[in-house]
Image (tube, rainbow, N blue to C red):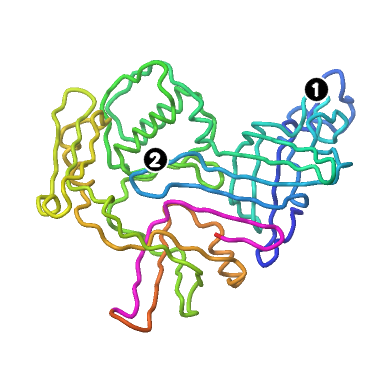
Amino acid sequence: MTGANVITGGTYLLELSSGYDSSAFYLDDSLLDGPAVLDGDGEDYNDITDVVQNITISRGRHKPLDVFGPGTMTVSISVPVGNRAYDPFNTSSVYYNTFTEQPGLAPLRPIRLSRNGEYLFTGLVTTFNQTYNMAGMTTYSIFAADNTYVLAQGFLPETVTTSETSSARITAVLSAATYTGGTSLTASPTATLGAYTIPSGTNVNAYINRIQQAEQGRIFCDRANVLTAQERIGTTLAAPTATFDDTGTATPYDSIFVEFDQQSVINNANITIESGGTLQNATDAASISEYFTQTESITDSLLSSDGQAATLASYLLYPNPRPRFTSVSTTFASLSDAQKTALAPIEIGDTVQATKTFTTGTPLAITQDLSVEGIDHVIDMNTGHRM
């Protein structure tokens, strides 16, 4: 690993695949007694950290009822005008694939970012933009997304299903979509889905979002780009992975956002399964009297029975708004090395604990345990890392 040190942050390594394997054996080109081998050793990754200015990563969702979109990473780099190593027009670039006559650095090439050996993002380049500036540097903007983006581009053939758990249905869908990425699926899902035939032309990710809607867990690509499915969230959280406070005894933060929102109220939930069921309703009369009727409705749930639909309707009720911490922000410049190492690889689904203290009023301290639903990184190679 080479990479580059980011002030107050650690050692970061941004690697972009050239799309081919320089050590593989190529017919009519490689020497029979040369170093090339039939299988090679995999794709070549190029360390481009030293030309990077800024990196931003956004993964996850904002609220528990939101679906997960693709995790994304944006990279800004600049090089002197005479440096054409990254120029897709430059056929003499060290990254140019002379065997296929294609630029080595191009869309849909794998890209990955790590800090001190721990991946923060892994995905594929979706856009590789270049700007020639006559008076200065040549700049590049690289946009990347994880495999949720890949799934959103795919469509399913007509697929007959059986009554099965949400994890088994994800496996069946990925098989029908010929998905080759890694997976980590919950071994104990809550939902059993009905034997509903999937119509031809159904978008893969849209259908996976329907599975999540039935399970009410989390389906996302983790920081190593492994498609991960977690069971229904429930009300019990795991022990905190990171603890934040403002007293100097835990990880320091520089801001906490508090949400106290009437729009989060759900006091009427209607669930109807896709075929053969009747509407299942759950209500909270006291909440309706206080906050008017606010309905969450699912008219084509993949759940297999009315009983499961009734359970989901009750689960979705959130009758009373409560003030709660909904985001915490910290800069690595304020953290110890141990705190940075613990915090950087935190994952969606982990638990964090945050405490805010006061000098007046009651109570004098508020502590909340919260599940991580989304993670943002902003890395400036000159000023540091904010998370």
Q: Residue at 45% x, 73% y: name it.
A: 245
Query: The C terminus is located in which quarter?
Result: bottom right
Reply above or below: 306 against 315.
above
Q: Position of residue 344 (x, y in %)?
A: 56, 59
Question: What main secondary structure does the magenta stretch of the protein show?
Answer: strand
Q: Position of residue 361 (x, y in %)?
A: 30, 81
Q: Can you identify the residue that label 2 sits on?
A: 67
Residue 77: in magenta span? no
Q: Residues within 10 Å of mark 1 (few under 14, many from 20)?
A: few
Disc 2 vs disc 1: Cβ atoms closer than 8 Å?
A: no
> Judging from the image, what secondary structure is the residue with disc 1 in?
loop
In this view, the mark in front (2 or 1): 2
Q: Residue at 22% x, 52% y: name it.
A: 318
Reply above or below: 45 against 331.
above
Spot the residue most to the front.
135
Instruction: Kindly indicate the quadrant of the structure image that contains residue 283.
Output: top left
Amino acid type, label 2:
Val
Q: Can you identify the residue that label 1 sits on?
A: 101
The one of 69 and 193 positioned closer to us in this rendering: 69
Region in magenta:
363-386
Q: Residues within 10 Å of mark 2 (few under 14, many from 20)?
A: many
Amino acid type, label 1:
Glu
| Comes first in the chain, label 2 or label 1 | 2
Spot the residue most to the bottom.
359
